[in-house]
Amino acid sequence: MHKLTQLIQESKHIVLSTHRQCDGDGLGSQLAMFYALKKLKKTVHLINVDATPKKYKFLNPEKHIQIFENDSRLPAEIDLVLIFDTNDYRLLEPLYQKLAEKKPKFAFVDHHPILNIIPAPSEHSWIDVTAASTGEIVFQLIEKLQVPWDAQMAKAIYTSVVFDTQLFRYVRNSPNSHLIAAQLLSQHFDIDEVHRYLFSHQTPEKMNFLAKALQKIEYTCNGRLGLIRIQSKDLLYHHLDMDDTRDLIDFIMNIDQLDAAVVFREDAPDVYKLSLRSKGKINVLPIAEMVGGGGHFSASGAYLNGKYEDLKLQIVNEMTKLLKSA
Ligand SMILES: [Mn+2]
């Protein structure tokens, strides 16, 4: 932590980014750090690899974040790149390679376990797998940098915390999420607005989609494993985008009898986003990693290429082995 704060203090031109298909944690971390670094008079660029989902509109991301395309011009000078909520550079391609050509220092600020299949993150990185959100690490970083808090910084970190803990349901057996949230609340921002946008921003179309999807859960492994397939045409039909499907898997994990769940979302013909969830001591990260993905102990995922029936067979087999051994 000391090394990283020193590096930030020494750097003048800083780029902040997060993983593709960004979420509330990565985005909140990125924006809070943006406001903090501005106060330290740094030149700061927010560059992401894809558009911010519309439910984060309350944070005004379009005001600050530039979307990187293959022909995009990068800032002329870059001393340091801070990447939030992942330590997997593959989730920032093709931006990562383009940034690397400019030879800046890279640091990942993250709470995901380090994967074996990619090179270890740079020495400046700060990775704490005990943190329930990346926002909690950024909170400490801002404290270390001694930047005074304001309402927009607090709101951004609060967004990170409540998004990743799902309103304090997944706090990893630590009081930190609550303690940090309590400190942030002294900045008087609209917390109801944050909760509403993150968790209640549903539409009739989304509810119709959910109703249909929930009817199609396949139960296997004596009812312990639930599986859903989302096809592109389902999203088109209901006028939804990919981010609208994100909470489906967490929703089905509320089914008491389930120990684990699998969602396959079709992103293109024969291209699937796989999501895995588990409860208790069941670790789904190795399965995601085996097929080229990553994530957390009980929430992981991967991007897969292949025929649905083949992919399903492979993943259900692995999940069945895992559940039987647990
Ligand atoms: Mn996170």
Image (cartoon, helix red, strand yellow):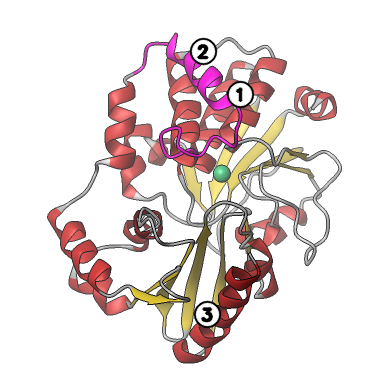
N-terminal of the two: label 3 or label 1?
1
Residue beneath disc 1? 139
Q: Which quadrant would the N terminus be assigned to in this image?
A: top right
- Where 119 falls versus 65 (above or below)? below
Residue stretch rendered in magenta on the structure: 165-189
Residue beneath disc 2? 183
Callout 2, which amino acid?
Gln
Residue beneath disc 3? 316
Q: Between label 2 and label 1, give the one nearer the viewer.
A: 2
> Do residues under tags 2 and 3 come within 8 Å of each other at their CB atoms?
no
Q: Nearer the viewer, residue 119 or 224?
A: 224
What distance separates the C-alpha of mark 2 from that of mark 3? Answer: 43 Å
User: How far across and how far down the image is residue 189, in percent?
Assistant: 36, 17
Q: Residue at x 64, y 70 (%)?
A: 287
Using the rendered image of the protein, determine whether residue 243 is visible from the camera's viewpoint. yes
Identify the main secondary structure in magenta.
loop
Q: How many marks?
A: 3
Q: Between label 3 and label 1, give the one nearer the viewer.
A: 3
Q: Which quadrant would the C terminus be assigned to in this image?
A: bottom right
Judged from the image, the secondary structure of the residue bearing numbered disc 3 is helix
Callout 3, which amino acid?
Val
> Do residues under tags 2 and 1 come within 8 Å of each other at their CB atoms?
yes
Which of the 4 image quarters holds residue 191?
Answer: top left
User: How far across and how far down the image is residue 173, in percent?
Assistant: 60, 33
**Label 2 crowding class (10 Å Cα cut-off): few <14, some 14-19, many 20+?**
few
Q: Is residue 220 found inside the magenta-colored segment of the image?
A: no
